[in-house]
Image: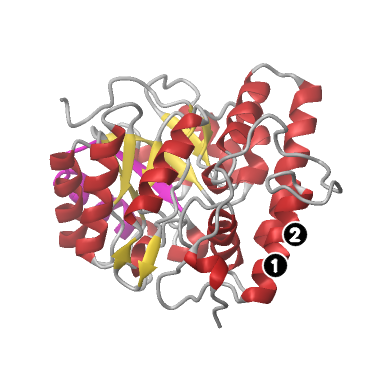
Amino acid sequence: MDKTRLPKKLRGIIPPMVTPLVARDALDVEGLERLVEHILAGGVAGLFVLGTTGEAPSLSYPLRREVIDRVCRQVRGRVPVLVGVTDTSFVESVRLARHAADAGAPAVVLSAPYYFPAGQRELLAYVRDIVAELPLPVFLYNMPSHTKLAFGPDVVRRLMDLPGIAGLKDSSGDMLYFHRIRRLTQDRDDWTLLMGPEELLADAVAAGGDGGVCGGANLCPELYVGLYEAAQARDAARIAELHARVMRLSETVYSVGNHGSAFIKGLKCALGCLGVCDDSMAEPFRRFGEDQREQVRRHLVDLGLLPGDGSAHARLDAAHRPVPVRETSSDRVAHP
């Protein structure tokens, strides 16, 4: 395939998959398989592995390669698999991208290098240098809260014509920035612009964005696919209904706990409660203890994702339950 471009522009929901773990450096293999099939059944347009929601920076290189191999082999080209290759080391990013190409992934995702603070001129040079070494098309990943460095609009403008750049995922949460990038890309039918924060998905599509990388689609893929389709169709009533469900999920499951890790912990805990995969976290995080896990369970009942005592309301999708509930090892043991 042409390393500089995808066969077609990506549009729709591309969930950033969590990485199911059973120990510090061990995959929950069966959970990973269930998660992939659960997400694909929701009608998504692709999968994004080894991103922020996948805890990629905390995973060993062998484990990252194992995730790539297993997901690409299981998906078998049903949807594109985008692979996060962000690293503090230029060489390791290139190695991971080459591994992704060998596994059959069609594209990689790259954020600004983190830890050492760089300037916009250095960022521009870095991207130009690394793209020349990568064997696959690249999506830029704007995540300034984690990298301390944003892809400024001028840098994006100068990179747009670089062969090998396929688009940008914006996780800044800054709609003014998103609108500025959209103005730069509006005449490019080969360039994909995706929204990161799911709470802004409808706004992003209304502004001309091509879809979203929504973490909640690990849990309820059909909800986010439905919201994307409603936004595309300008169906105001449906948008309001589904956006309200997205916000309820954000304000409940993602809000258990006191730290910035609450989103990933809540999402993994919810998947564990539903029997999809284990809820172990990569270091330095710990999964929720039983009190917090019970809060997540109650939220899932209220959201209609777990059976309750008849008091469930505001169902995320009354016709869709992701996975039959079953007891897991996480249900049987309280973790500190």
What is the distance, in whole Å, between disc 1 and disc 2 at their CAs? Answer: 6 Å
SS at badge 1: helix
Magenta residues (range): 122-142
Query: Would residue 102 appear left or right of 335 to someone viewing this image?
Result: left
Could you say which quadrant of the image residue 273 lies in? bottom right
| Quarter of the view holding residue 55 | bottom left
Task: Tell me, yes or no, whether the two marked residues, 1 and 2, touch with CB atoms within 8 Å.
Answer: yes
According to the picture, the residue beneath numbered tag 1 turns out to be: 294
Residue visible at 56% across and 66% down? 331
Q: What percent of the width, then of the height, locates residue 138? A: 29, 40
Residue 45: image tag: none
Q: Which mark is residue 298?
A: 2
Residue type, label 1: Glu
Q: Is residue 293 left or right of residue 252?
A: left
**Residue 123 is inside the magenta segment:** yes
Whether residue 231 is visible to the viewer of this picture, yes or no, is yes
Estimate how packed mark 1 is, as few (under 14), some (14 to 19) or many (20 or more) residues with alpha carbons within 10 Å.
Answer: some
- Amino acid on which disc 2 is placed: Arg
Residue 289 position (above or below residue 229): below
The answer to whether one can see residue 257 in this image is no
